[in-house]
């Protein structure tokens, strides 16, 4: 089966990793998550990312999830695989394995480990070059505060030109719109997929700045997609009105819940059986959960009724 081609625009949410109440991976639940996401009208799915709790998965679990997700999606939509690692060798090995499994694209953060171990710009460029060589796939750079690595616009443009497979950029830093605008202006044709992230909490500003897509969670991509579609078609007013209706839920997810929001809503909607997160992460407070579900019901998200 041919690997689907990744689009330069659209909505590519992150798949959560469902766990049983005992903390084991719920493999059947993972299949249902993927089916629900496809029914949400997504343009692609990103797996093994931070919102997939990748930092709480063993290497063996990563392998299991990679194979399960690729075989179950079965080419229905493109799959982006996150292969970040501080070790260039391990990131390259992960990326080669993802390519062999049928991934359409890779997403990586710059190499870092805690606050004290970070590569310099030369090391980052070499890191991405070796991943590109090992995989042969297009690469999305995840520019997020979590890494603590400052990726300047001039450096990102140099990286894109030095490593031609680096063509997509997920900008999640403060002032994302300004950085996206500067990146697009400085990089020209080298910047094929300027995306935002962070649950799409700055989506309208980022689209106005030239973003062509977003990588949100799987909580409400069915309601975020029309914002992107309207905006790219030149219907900015419709995009703004659509976004205003869902912004309270996006804000609540981003500021109060984080990755737990999607799991909670999917459990309530019968997609998965448990919203368990792995320790040291903690479950949502009951009051926070109630507030989330109230907003989700008001917005009528598909995930809240998909399994019922």
Image (tube, rainbow, N blue to C red):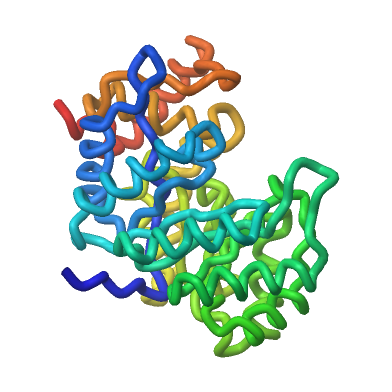
**Height in image: 93 above or below 2?**
above
Q: Is residue 6 left or right of residue 48?
A: left
**Height in image: 185 above or below 8?**
below
Q: Position of residue 173 (x, y in %)?
A: 70, 55
* Image quadrant in which the C terminus is located: top left
User: Which of the two residues, 242 or 72, is positioned nearer the viewer here?
Assistant: 72
The residue located at (73%, 51%) in the rendering is 112
The residue located at (43%, 16%) in the rendering is 290
Residue 81 visible: yes
Q: Is residue 101 left or right of residue 141?
A: left
The residue located at (44%, 44%) in the rendering is 217
Q: Position of residue 4 (x, y in %)?
A: 26, 70
Q: From this viewpoint, which residue is outermost toward the right?
A: 116
Residue 233: image quadrant is bottom left
Residue 229: image quadrant is bottom left
Q: From this viewpoint, which residue is outermost toward the bottom?
A: 189
* Image quadrant in which the N terminus is located: bottom left
**Height in image: 85 above or below 65?**
below
Residue 236: image quadrant is bottom left
Residue 230 visible: no
Q: Position of residue 248 (x, y in %)?
A: 50, 37
User: Which of the two residues, 260 or 134, is positioned nearer the viewer here?
Assistant: 134
User: Which of the two residues, 158 or 231, is positioned nearer the viewer here?
Assistant: 158
């Amino acid at each position: 089966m041919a690997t689907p081609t990744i689009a330069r625009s659209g909505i590519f949410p992150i798949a959560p990793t469902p766990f049983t109440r005992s903390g084991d991976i719920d493999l059947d639940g993972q299949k249902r998550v993927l089916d629900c996401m496809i029914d949400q009208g997504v343009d692609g799915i990103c797996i093994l990312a931070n919102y997939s709790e990748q930092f709480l998965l063993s290497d063996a679990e990563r392998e299991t999830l990679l194979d399960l997700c690729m075989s179950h999606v079965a080419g229905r939509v493109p799959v982006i695989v996150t292969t970040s690692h501080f070790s260039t060798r391990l990131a390259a090995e992960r990326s080669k394995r993802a390519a062999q499994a049928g991934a359409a694209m890779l997403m990586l953060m710059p190499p870092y480990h805690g606050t004290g171990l970070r590569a310099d710009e030369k090391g980052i460029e070499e890191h991405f070059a070796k991943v590109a060589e090992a995989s042969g796939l297009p690469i999305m750079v995840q520019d997020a505060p979590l890494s603590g690595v400052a990726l300047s616009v001039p450096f990102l443009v140099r990286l894109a030109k030095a490593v031609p497979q680096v063509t997509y950029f997920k900008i999640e830093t403060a002032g994302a719109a300004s950085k996206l605008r500067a990146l697009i202006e400085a990089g020209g044709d080298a910047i094929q997929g300027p995306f935002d992230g962070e649950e799409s909490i700055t989506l309208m500003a980022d689209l106005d700045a030239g973003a062509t897509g977003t990588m949100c969670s799987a909580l409400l991509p069915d309601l975020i997609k029309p914002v992107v579609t309207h905006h790219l078609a030149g219907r900015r007013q419709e995009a703004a009105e659509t976004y205003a209706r869902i912004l309270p839920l996006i804000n609540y997810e981003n500021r109060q819940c984080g990755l737990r929001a999607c799991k909670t809503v999917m459990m309530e909607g019968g997609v998965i059986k448990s919203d368990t997160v792995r320790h040291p992460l903690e479950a949502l407070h009951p009051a926070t959960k109630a507030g989330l579900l109230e907003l989700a019901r008001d917005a009528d998200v598909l995930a809240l009724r998909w399994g019922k």
